[in-house]
Amino acid sequence: MTQTDTSALMEITSRPPIVFTEGQGSWLTDSAGKRYLDFVQGWAVNCLGHSPKPIVDALAGQAARLINCSPAYFNEPMARLAAMIAEASGLEQVFFTNSGAEANEGAIKLARKWGAIHRGGAYEIVTMDHGFHGRTLATMSASGKAGWDRLFEPKVPGFPKVPLNDLAAVERAIGPKTVAVMLEPIQGEAGVYAATDAFLRDLRALTKQRGILLILDEIQTGVGRTGRMFGFQHTGVTPDIMTLGKGLGGGVPLAALVAKREVMCFAHGDQGGTFNGNPLMTAAGIAVMEELSRPGFLAQVAETGAYLADALAKLSQKHGCGGVRGRGLLLALDLERPIGSQLVERARDKGLLINAPRPDCLRFMPALTVSKAEIDIMIEVLDGVMAEVAAPAMAK
Ligand SMILES: *Cc1c(COP(=O)(O)O)cnc(C)c1O
């Protein structure tokens, strides 16, 4: 238990009575000195692990030089990071935001502006069942999360939903009011369900043919998570608009709206924000992009991901669970029974942090720098916990 008084905090979710005080690499320490192996990493945010030297140095150096000069002026880190993202993605224009939801709001606004100019006022964006795009009013409306359709009425209109990987349904949903199709290359919050490479290629062809935009929400899949810099790079298709977040700041609040030059139609005053593109956060983003661009870094992510997937598959077989889903270091284990939260709690008691996005699956989003030895420890702890929890369920 903790002596920290948390009662002034709005209770917006259930949290265990733990207060974390330190982190290093794949490990967290709480106020009682207990250590935890972290396979959540700030929700796939700390791509280089906890307090990595490149980010600590970038933040300290930039903080001493210039923290904020107002979004009304250029600063060096903002310009440099935008150029790095443009170069890596092939999309030429970048606008920085402070959260993924804000980046997606920007994507929705940009698409609607583009529709107003080029598609006779079209504004509808076709999105996917079970998709997740954030917690602002518009991004909740764009999301297809179960139970959200009745929350915070009235909804922002203009987000017809279709099943993932169903091209015919997308075709049926496209009409004269449609301006774009928006989806995650892999649905993370839904439980790690991938858009197939074929579906993404077909969508690209379809949107091109109909003269509408393809928007990829790469907030979870981008910035190295799948073993490539961006998830779309596995498929050979390029979106018109992409959003980044989570890993981009390596732990600090930084996200981005990225678009092709010919799509960028914001006029002065359409978009902005007090903290957007501040030099402190963008300096951290530069440190992340530099680390990920080192020769062999992304290949290492792919290799570590394959190692983790293999270990999870063996564990699954041993305990009679289902398949392993995902790519790179965004993986899920299908439990085939609703024991996710039980496993999460018992693992935490034993010093392992994992996540159950749904009752019947576990999600793994470790640091991209996680070692095989750390994966071995994680598997060993999870094995023990599964033996405790899963055994009764299997005794049919
Ligand atoms: C996390 C996430 C978001 C929301 O990002 P926030 O920074 O929490 O606003 C949006 N889309 C996807 C795919 C995400 O994983």
Image: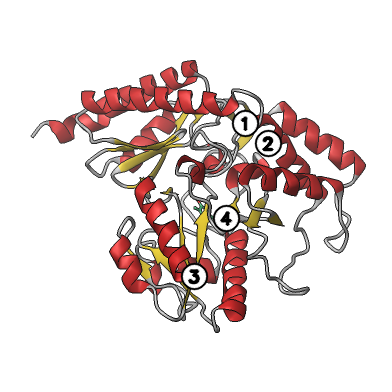
Tell me, yes or no, whether the two marked residues, 2 and 1, touch with CB atoms within 8 Å. Answer: yes
Q: Nearer the viewer, mark 4 or mark 2?
A: 4
Q: Which is nearer the N-term, disc 3 or disc 2?
A: 3
Which residue in the protein does label 2 denote?
288
Which residue in the protein does label 1 denote?
48
Quadrant housing residue 343: top left
The residue tagged with tag 1: helix, strand or loop? loop
Placement of 248 over or under 112, stated as above or below: above
Tell me, yes or no, whether the two marked residues, 4 and 2, touch with CB atoms within 8 Å. Answer: no
The residue tagged with tag 2: helix, strand or loop? helix
Which residue in the protein does label 4 denote?
242
Tell me, yes or no, whether the two marked residues, 3 and 2, touch with CB atoms within 8 Å. Answer: no
**In the image, residue 261 lies at what x, y percent?**
67, 60
> Local crowd at mark 3 within 10 Å, few (<14), some, or many (≥20)?
some
> Local crowd at mark 4 within 10 Å, few (<14), some, or many (≥20)?
many
The residue tagged with tag 4: helix, strand or loop? strand
Placement of 164 over or under 271, stated as above or below: above
Which residue in the protein does label 3 denote?
211
Mark 3 lies within 8 Å of ligand 1 (Cβ measured):
no
Query: What amino acid is at disc 2?
Result: Val
Q: Nearer the viewer, mark 2 or mark 1?
A: 2
Query: What amino acid is at disc 3?
Result: Gly
Q: Is residue 130 left or right of residue 155?
A: left
